[in-house]
Amino acid sequence: HNTLLITAFRRYGTQEMQAEYLGRLATGTVGSFCLSEAESGSDAFALKTRARQDGGDWVLEGSKCWISNAMEAGLFVVFANADPSKAHRGITAFVVERDNPGLQIGKKEDKLGIRASSTCELNFDACRVPASAVLGEVGEGYKMAIGLLNEGRIGIGAQMVGLAQGAYDYALRYICTRKQFGRPVADFQGMQFQYARARMEIEAARLLVYNAARLKESGRPFVQEAAMAKLKSSEVAGDVSSQCIDWLGGVGFTREFAAEKFYRDAKIGTIYEGTSNIQLATIGKLVRASYDDA
């Protein structure tokens, strides 16, 4: 919502779009970023959803999957190919309102984690939108998506750092009061070594996120650093939340305590807005190119 939708309207929306949508997105509704399809996950630009002109309107046909916030969203930014003969250079972004005829909200996924955020299929059956619904320029959707996702990785990094910190704080409060052999569990050196290292990893991930954000805000190249921040922070969130269950012992394995929720929620960090392998590929490509220029 914040890193993809609001940035999209701020950067690519007309003044009329910004006046119409930014206030709503800040106060009354959430939005959904609709790129992924059943056959185009990491290969996002192989999407099959089509947009054809009909008079002064555009008609969308196709489907999307793994769309975050879809059940609650008031509007959707939908990527569809307006000219398949141009391959990915035909991809265009459209703003579709929730009550737009031809838009159907499909199955809600029963997910492992981040269950407070709905994830659904979307279907577009002769979904007609006006020419003013085009966000940015026709055929520029692929560039928009790449740029937005590169920035969004900083946001996911921040999310994962916050999750790791939350799991850590929850577990530390428990082991500082839970006693075994007459002393708090947190006082045993073996435990101290574990939570000292976990704290170090969280701080390392946090600094990677801050550095990527600093570069982006100052207008400098940040794609490699954003990929590093997302990759590291998602790995740290998974590792730390797993350790926190161990530190709580048996109660950590129950739904009565929140540690298992942190653990389930952490897993998405290595998957959405670019899998860990996509981050590694991005980092590797940019590192390799930097040595060609040396």
Image: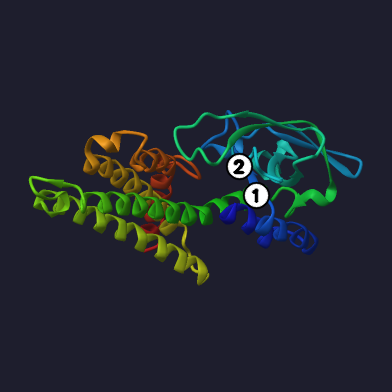
Q: Residue at x 72, y 36 (%)?
A: 85
**Towards the viewer: 52 or 242:** 242
Q: Residue at x 64, y 39 (%)?
A: 70
Instruction: Return the x and y of residue 246 as percentages of the image width and height.
Output: 23, 40
Few, some or many residues within 10 Å of mark 1 (<14, 14–19, 20+): many
Q: Secondary structure at mark 2?
A: loop
Instruction: Return the x and y of residue 87 as percentages of the image width and height.
Output: 66, 38
Determine which residue is flagged by label 1. Answer: 30
CB under 8 Å between discs 2 and 1: yes
Determine which residue is flagged by label 2. Answer: 69
Quadrant containing the C terminus in the rendered view: bottom left
Direction right: furthest residue: 55
Q: Secondary structure at mark 1?
A: loop
Label 1 is placed on what type of residue? Answer: Val
**Towards the viewer: 87 or 220:** 220
How many numbered marks, from 0 up?
2
Q: Residue at x 54, y 51 (%)?
A: 149
Q: Residue at x 69, y 54 (%)?
A: 28
Residue 131 located left or right of residue 28: right
Whether residue 66 appears in this view of the structure is: no
Residue 232 located left or right of residue 199: right
Instruction: Return the x and y of residue 280 as percentages of the image width and height.
Output: 38, 46
**Towards the viewer: 282 or 196:** 196
Residue 235 located left or right of residue 120: left
Query: Eyeballing the image, is 92 above or below 214?
Result: above
Query: Eyeballing the image, is 113 above or below 39?
Result: below
The colour scheme applied to this rendered structure is rainbow
Distance between mark 2 and mark 1 Cα atoms: 7 Å
- Residue 147 bears which disc, if any? none
Instruction: Return the x and y of residue 249 as percentages of the image width and height.
Output: 22, 38
Label 2 is placed on what type of residue? Answer: Asn
**Towards the viewer: 139 or 292:** 139
